[in-house]
Image: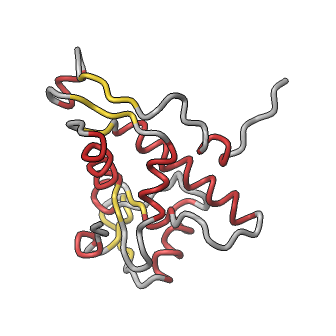
Amino acid sequence: MKPKKSWKEKLHDSKDLPKVEEITGKMIKMWGEGTFVIPAPLEVDEIMKKVPKGKIITINEIRSKLANKHGATIACPITTGIFAWIAAHAADEEEKEGKKRITPYWRTLKTGGELNEKYPGGIDRQKKMLEQEGHSIIPKGKKVIVENYGKMLFKS
């Protein structure tokens, strides 16, 4: 049996990405016409790494940066989200190995400023990390969000 890949190995496995493709078929209804980029995992990680303490970024901002970088209409929301998740787990792996400077994945939020339950330690850990950096975390219906997240967005 082949050994399971570590999160860091998954992060560094680009699988011939990035790739820009034409939006076709059923995707046109969801995304409109144009092109979409499927980013490489390290490209998502690279953007996440740039977010300074006290600031946050959402997956949509990451997608916008990736689309601009590649001259595409949009960046694929599914792969971008998956690669942010992989980057978060790779950073957690590094932290457990004693590395001090890791990708600050807790600063990357879902759309609408929502915390991500799929990150290492779930919402509780992300909430704790964000509160340590001065953010207020509040419930919004069934979701948990960063209060006034729009004012905290990282612009690079």
- Foreground pick, 8 / 131: 8
Q: At 76% from the left edge and 35% from the top edge, which residue is drawn? A: 4
Q: On the rendered structure, is 152 left or right of 101? A: left
Above or below: residue 105 compared with residue 3:
below
Residue 14: image quadrant is top right
Q: Looking at the image, which residue is at 47% across and 56% down? A: 46
Quarter occupied by residue 88: bottom right
- The image shows a total of numbered marks equal to 0
Instruction: Name the image quarter holding the N terminus.
Output: top right
- The residue lying at 44 percent from left, 67 percent from top is 107
Q: Is residue 55 above or below residue 141?
A: below
Q: Which percent across, then down, holds residue 124?
A: 54, 68
Q: Position of residue 80 (x, y in %)?
A: 41, 43
Residue at the (29%, 66%) spot, across then down: 156
Q: How is the image coloured?
A: secondary structure
Q: Depth check: 42 or 77 in front?
A: 42
Decide which of 66, 138 is in the foreground and name it.
66
Q: Is residue 153 above or below residue 64?
A: below
Residue found at the very far top of the displayed protein: 25
Q: Is residue 33 left or right of residue 100?
A: left
Q: Would you identify the image quadrant in which residue 2 lies?
A: top right
73 left or right, relative to 140? left
x and y percentages locating residue 67 in the rendered image = 27, 43
The outermost residue toward the left is 33
Residue 99 picture location, percent across and down:
71, 69
